[in-house]
Each structure stands twice: as C-alpha cells, then as structure tokens.
Image (cartoon, rainbow, N blue to C red):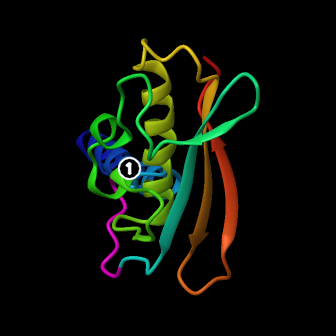
Amino acid sequence: MRVVGRRVVVLGVVCAQLAFIAAGYSSDHKTFAFQMFPEASTWQADVVRVTPDGRRVPVSKPWAGYHWDELVPDSALTYPASRHHADAGLANQLAFLRSALDYVARNTPCDHETRYLEATVTSWHNDDPPRIEVFRSHVR
C-alpha cells in the first residue's frame, strides 16, 4: 500500500509540473516558463480615440482632462508610438497594451466623445518581417 501511495504522489507531482509548463508556454505572460535568452522583439503602436463620427484622435493629445501617460504610467506603454524592446516577450507586451486600451476606455467617465480606443501595432518578432495588427478596446 505504501508503494502505491508513493507512486501516486510522484505521478501527481510530475503531472503538476507538466501542467505548469504547458500553462506557462500557452499564456501571454509566461509566469512559469522562464527562458534564459529572451526574444529580440520590438513593437510600436499608434493609439487613437475613435469618435462616433469616425474621427481618429491620437491619445498623445489630452482629452476631457485626461492624459494617456497619466492613465497608463507603465514605461513602455506611456509612449506607444516609440519603438520599444519587448522586455518580457512580444505576446506579454501586447497583452498589456490590450489591457491598457480597455482600462482607459473603462476609466474615463468625463469623456463623452470617445466611442472606443484603437491601436495599430507594428511588431517585429525576433528577425521576422514586421507584422501589423489592430487592437480595439470595448465599445463605450
């Protein structure tokens, strides 16, 4: 009975470790998937506010008393139009940018003219050619 119990415990530990590895490599933030040599990826984004009439206003200009750099004080996200190194991986940085768009859309109650925020992101994963994606916040 003790031998069976030990085998069950060892099998449980091995399965848990495999689950952490699978979760680490499949998520954007890779909490349990440390890599000795990080990516050499970079990214930049043009972030705009889209109004109901279709105008696209850059978030670099203050609006309704709000400033993008005050709402999103993270060093890489503060100035998204500049090209940044993806410190913790490209998927990680772009996940933070998507979250920042939703955060700003949710936390600007005095802004009555923005319908949603949009980021046109150009990313360079390691030595690959540039990839362009468009991220949108939820519609307000």
User: Which residue is at the front of the view, 37 or 77?
Assistant: 77
Which residue appears farthest toward the left when viewing the image?
Answer: 2
Element assignment for label 1: helix
- Quadrant of the rendering where the C terminus is positioned: top right
Residue 116 is situated, as x and y percent measured from the top left of the image, at 62, 28
Q: What stretch of residues is rendered in magenta?
A: 31-37
Task: Write the residue at 30% across / 79% down.
Answer: 36
The spot of residue 83 in percent (x, y) is: 45, 71
Which residue position is annotated with label 1? 11
Location of residue 51 by image quarter: top right
Residue type, mark 1 in image: Leu
Residue plotted at (64% across, 83% down): 128
Q: Nearer the viewer, residue 124 or 7?
A: 124
Q: Residue furthest right?
A: 53
Q: Estimate the x, y position of residue 74 in percent, counting from the top left.
A: 28, 49
In the image, residue 49 sits, relative to residue 108, either above or below, namely below
Residue 17 visible:
no
Q: Nearer the viewer, residue 109 or 34?
A: 109
Q: What secondary structure is the stretch in magenta mostly built from?
A: loop
